[in-house]
């Protein structure tokens, strides 16, 4: 087994271990924190496909995270009020079934990501960063000003949605669901980057000129990666909304985009386990440093600076050495 | 008479006031190496880029196998079978030599959007890729990262990548640039083999190489083709001697 795979599995084991510790010690706070880490890791894994493997520095993934969250919130609250989500052009009923909500969140993220991708992928570098940011901010202000779903105040939906008749209000059950989704997402990523598509995406990042000369349009490859990336982050958004039983425009704001980016960079860009390491480290820093000072993000900034300056491969890079996805 | 594999007629391209190509016409017949020579700044690379579809030409036509390809982008032209190599090696430096070639094989297959099967065990890619490396003399370097190759080996890899595309026409932009005498001789031999599979439009600076491998030569000066002919005809042409050989010698 390769070292990086081993590190990814170890990270997952540590996350699981933390939750088990919380479960046995009857500390729901720790379990919920672990669930949050798993969800953030899923969001980061989504971004990692675009940012890491595709070299597409999206500063607008909050759009997809938030869309996933709102999809969950809107469908769930409609079901509780016994109202349809919409009646035109097609009638969509509310639902509290998690798989249904997940699918809707993924599809919603896809529908939003396609036009955003088509526009922003015509640019590159700094312009790409700014355009993705602009699209996400547009959605943020739309959510703030649209009163139907709570506007600025956000939307609460009181009871967690269910899957397979499990009691989702139990933190341990909810953690296992999030952890399971994370494992599936990471497995999917591992397969994806090793596939033909993964090879084309790697070439699009390393040398788009060569990809074109070979007869493959980089735009098509990048758009596909961007949309898949958005769908995964959208799924994380749905889980996050469910975790909090609340969704607000904050999920769409650029702070969220920045946070998801921090998970990836802290943990390791284009590393399978990177987002897991990043999300865990981020939450760990938040929990420990928050007790020391209210301005814990200053310290986070210093850590981030050190990672960018001295450990370009992030935490996973530090442990596993140079990456080897397509050697 | 057979139809040309590639035909450029009255092609012009200007950058502002600078006319990089003026009414360029040339053709590439099956089975030949047609060399395009010219002093620095003659517009050779611009011509390659317009033929490859990387930059749009202002006027004129490009026919590939008899079909107009003026409106096709670079990727579409590559899919038709126009394989170009770059003057400055254009490779994925962090990938292994083998993976670089596998990508080219995959591009020809047209089956890029496959998300699940790992490429590492994909014999449909591995087989042809290994064969191309063998032909280009890079078999032993398959697992090396492209960044660790010597300059000459990178040029060989460029050719392996073109081979992998099973092209109908090779478009080679100074493949010999910066090579030592030994690799030059090997590459000249390789070029003579290549023309059996598909004709080569060879853009080259090195006169000795051109005269030793080319079947026909066109001379480009200030964006215009001033002469086309066999090696002996070009050697004897007074305009060419004045414009090019005189400077070089």
Image: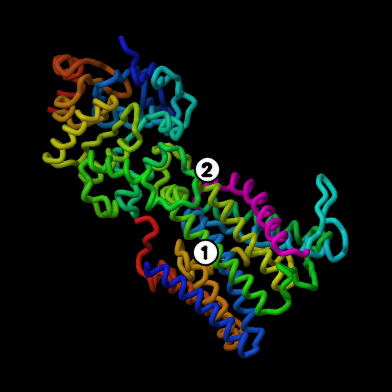
**Residue B58: x and y, percent?**
45, 23
Q: Quadrant of the N terminus of chain B?
A: top left
Q: A67 left or right of A89?
A: left
Q: Is residue A34 above or below residue B243?
A: below
* Upstream in sequence: badge 2 or badge 1: 1
Q: Is residue A111 part of the magenta span, yes or no?
A: yes
Whether residue A104 is situated above or below residue B154 in the rendered picture: below
As drawn, the residue found furthest toward the right would be A82
- Which percent across, then down, holds residue B93? 33, 52
Q: Is residue A136 left or right of residue B214?
A: right
Give the residue displayed 33% in from the left and 27% down from the top.
B169
Label 2 CA crowd tier, 10 Å (few <14, some 14–19, many 20+):
some
**Up-down relation of residue A289 to residue B190 (above or below):** below
Read off the magenta span.
A96-125
Q: Residue at x 30, y 24 (%)?
A: B222
What number is the disc on residue A220?
2
User: Subunit of mark 1?
Assistant: A
For residue B13, side relative to residue B42 (left or right): right
Residue B60 in view (yes/no): no
Residue under circle 1?
A: A186
Label 1 Cα neighbours within 10 Å, binned few <14 / some 14-19 / many ≥20: many
Placement of the C terminus of chain B among the 4 image quadrants: top left
Image coloring type: rainbow
* Left or right of B225, for residue B61: right
- Which secondary structure lies at badge 2? helix
**Is residue A36 highlighted in magenta?**
no
**Disc 2 and disc 1 in contact, CB within 8 angstroms:** no
């Amino acid at each position: 087994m390769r070292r990086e795979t081993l590190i990814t599995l170890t990270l997952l084991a540590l996350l699981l271990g933390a939750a088990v510790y919380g479960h046995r010690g009857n500390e729901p706070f720790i379990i919920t924190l672990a669930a949050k880490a798993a969800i953030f890791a899923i969001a980061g894994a989504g971004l990692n496909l675009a940012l890491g493997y595709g070299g597409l520095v999206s500063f607008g993934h909050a759009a997809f995270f938030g869309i996933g969250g709102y999809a969950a919130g809107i469908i769930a609250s409609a079901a509780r009020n016994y109202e349809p989500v919409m009646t035109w052009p097609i009638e969509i009923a509310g639902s509290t079934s998690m798989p249904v909500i997940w699918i809707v969140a993924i599809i919603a993220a896809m529908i939003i990501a396609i036009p955003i991708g088509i526009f922003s992928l015509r640019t590159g570098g700094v312009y790409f960063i700014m355009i993705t940011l602009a699209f996400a901010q547009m959605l943020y202000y739309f959510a703030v000003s649209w009163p139907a779903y709570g506007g600025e105040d956000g939307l609460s939906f009181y009871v967690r949605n269910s899957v397979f008749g499990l009691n989702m209000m139990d933190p341990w059950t909810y953690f296992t669901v999030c952890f399971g989704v994370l494992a599936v997402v990471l497995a999917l990523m591992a397969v994806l980057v090793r596939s033909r598509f993964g090879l084309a995406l790697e070439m699009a990042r390393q040398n788009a000129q060569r990809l074109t000369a070979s007869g493959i349009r980089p735009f098509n490859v990048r758009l596909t990666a961007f949309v898949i990336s958005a769908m995964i982050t959208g799924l994380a958004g749905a889980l996050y909304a469910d975790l909090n039983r609340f969704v607000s425009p904050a999920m769409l704001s650029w702070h969220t985009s920045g946070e998801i980016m921090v998970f990836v960079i802290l943990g390791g860009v284009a590393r399978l386990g990177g987002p897991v390491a990043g999300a865990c480290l981020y939450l760990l820093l938040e929990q420990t440093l928050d007790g020391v000072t209210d301005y814990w993000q200053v310290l986070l900034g210093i850590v981030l600076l050190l990672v960018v300056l001295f450990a370009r491969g992030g935490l996973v890079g530090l442990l596993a050495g140079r990456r080897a996805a397509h050697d | 008479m057979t139809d040309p594999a590639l035909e450029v007629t009255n092609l012009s391209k200007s950058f502002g006031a600078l006319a990089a190509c003026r009414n360029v016409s040339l053709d590439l017949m099956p089975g030949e190496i047609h060399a395009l020579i010219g002093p620095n700044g003659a517009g050779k690379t611009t011509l390659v880029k317009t033929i490859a579809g990387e930059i749009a030409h202002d006027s004129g036509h490009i026919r590939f196998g008899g079909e107009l390809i003026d409106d096709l982008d670079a990727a579409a032209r590559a899919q038709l079978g126009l394989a170009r190599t770059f003057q400055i090696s254009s490779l994925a430096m962090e990938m292994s030599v083998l993976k670089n070639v596998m990508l080219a094989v995959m591009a020809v297959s047209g089956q890029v959007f496959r998300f699940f099967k790992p490429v590492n065990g994909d014999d449909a890619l591995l087989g042809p890729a290994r064969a191309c490396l063998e032909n280009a003399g890079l078999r032993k370097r398959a697992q090396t990262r492209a960044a660790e190759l010597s300059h000459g080996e990178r040029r060989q890899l460029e050719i392996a990548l073109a081979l992998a595309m099973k092209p109908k026409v090779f478009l080679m932009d100074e493949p010999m640039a910066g090579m030592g005498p030994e690799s030059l001789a090997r590459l000249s031999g390789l070029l003579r083999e290549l023309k059996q599979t598909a004709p080569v439009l060879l853009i080259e600076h090195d006169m000795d190489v051109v005269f030793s491998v080319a079947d026909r030569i066109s001379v480009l000066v200030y964006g215009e083709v001033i002469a086309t002919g066999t090696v002996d005809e070009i050697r004897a042409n007074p305009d060419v001697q004045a414009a090019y050989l005189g400077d070089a010698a």
